[in-house]
Amino acid sequence: MIYMDNAATTKISEAVAKEILNTVEVFGNPSSLHRLGIEAEKKVEAAREQIAKKLGVNKKTIYFTSGGTESNNLALIGTANLLQKRGKHIITSKIEHPSVLETAKFLEKQGFEVSFASVDCDGRLDLEEFSSLLRPDTVLVSIMHANNETGVIQPVEQIKRKMKEKSPIAKLHIDAVQSFCKLPVTPTAWDADLVSVSAHKIHGPKGVGALYIKDGKISPIIHGGEQQSEIRPGTENVLGIAGFGKATETAEFDFSRAKALREYFKERLLKEVENIKINGSDEYSSGSVLNVSFLGVKAEILLHAFEAKGLYVSTGSACSSHKPQPSHVLMAMRLSKKEIEGAVRFSFDETLTEEEIEQAVEIVKTETAEIRKYM
Ligand code: PLP
């Protein structure tokens, strides 16, 4: 098997699996006052420390959630509700993950005004347009760090600089689900107020994530419990959290190797496969995603043909691949219908070898030629 769908999810690493198994014995409720509770609480706090360390922040600013989707919901709804008396304008971009886009649309229905900023043909935020959208009553800007479909990195520092000039009360939320432990995710250097991360993209378990909240000020979206300062109540997912902590601690992604591997794979595909187009900026690539349009072929047909040969990839993002709608990210980049229909996402992790890349090229070349014979 050659697994090139790491942006959808990753395999749990051995170290993480071991940590989860060990934690099974620690069955107390972290809120209990007795020894068993304290042991469980220690596990949760150790993981909080590991994640905080990776982000270079104080552990008190880390709140565990059920994953990136909940972190994004809490960041957007919680901030909008907190600051609504000061302003009701929110900015996000057209290429965000659905957990941001749909939440922004939900807030629109609640009476907030949302501007959806554009990107250029390379998938980078149009900073000039973004700047023109900023207003004194803008209370929140939510932009992703690395895009899940293209791997394109967004200009976080420049965004914050523009916000300071024109929207001083606005908070900056960064969805760093695709970049955490792969690229430097630096809330302090970015001067970000909120940052979302998720465990299952970094060889941790599914269903656990975290939100960094700089000042600890947000309106909760879940109620009923005193855990995590009532910001995110509910008995903590101790197993998942312990696994997340270990995944963060043991993450081994090497950006320069990933970028070189991506470059090599790209060059080999361009040489071996006719009629393809690479989507998204090379210069600003996270190194972990290569989005390729196979012109004249439907991506879904390719996906299954590759799968039959043991190569696992995605069409667009995993979350939207059950829906037959064209990718909103590639549409925002103004790709043609044909380019969007044939778009396949290959996403890497640090375990992928040069030999696997060679095998993948061979499968892609052979299967694409075979399918094209019948088109
Ligand atoms: N944000 C981005 C950029 C993602 O890629 C994903 C998942 O694919 C999410 C948020 C949602 O994270 P989770 O799957 O942990 O809910």
Image (cartoon, grey):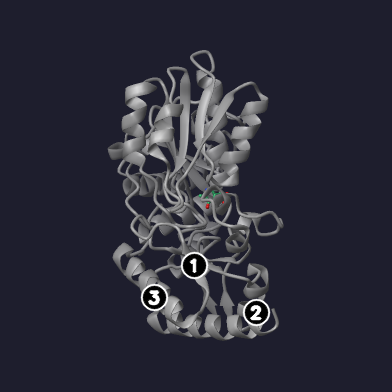
Look at 36% across and 22% down and name the residue there: 166
Structural distance between the alpha carbons of marks 2 and 3? 22 Å
How many residues crowd around disc 2 within 10 Å: few (fewer than 14), some, or many (20 or more)? many
The amino acid pointed to by label 2 is Ala
Q: Cα distance, mark 2 to mark 1? A: 19 Å
Q: How many marks?
A: 3
One can see residue 35 in this view: no
Vertical position of residue 68 compared to residue 88: above or below: below
How far apart are labels 3 and 1 at the CA level?
11 Å
Under mark 3, the amino acid is: Glu
Residue 359 or residue 269, whichever sits in front: 269
Classify mark 2: helix, strand or loop. Answer: helix
Q: Which mark is residue 277?
A: 1
Residue 316 position by quadrant: bottom right
Q: Are marks 2 and 3 in contact (CB under 8 Å)?
A: no
- Indicate whether 48 appears above or below 112: below
Quarter of the image that includes the C terminus? bottom right
Q: Which badge, 2 or 3, is on the more N-terminal residue?
A: 3
**Label 3 residue SS:** helix
Task: Label 1, secondary structure: give it.
Answer: strand
Splitting the image into 4 quarters, where does residue 266 fall?
bottom left
In primary-sequence order, the first of circles 2 and 1 is: 1
Q: Name the quadrant of the N terminus.
A: bottom right
Q: Position of residue 295 (x, y in %)?
A: 58, 70
Residue tagged 3: 267
Question: Circle 1: is it few (<14), some (14-19), or many (20+) Cα within 10 Å?
Answer: some
Residue 182 visible somewhere in the drawing: yes
Quadrant for residue 136, please give it.
Answer: top left
At 36% across and 64% down in the image, what residue appears? Answer: 253
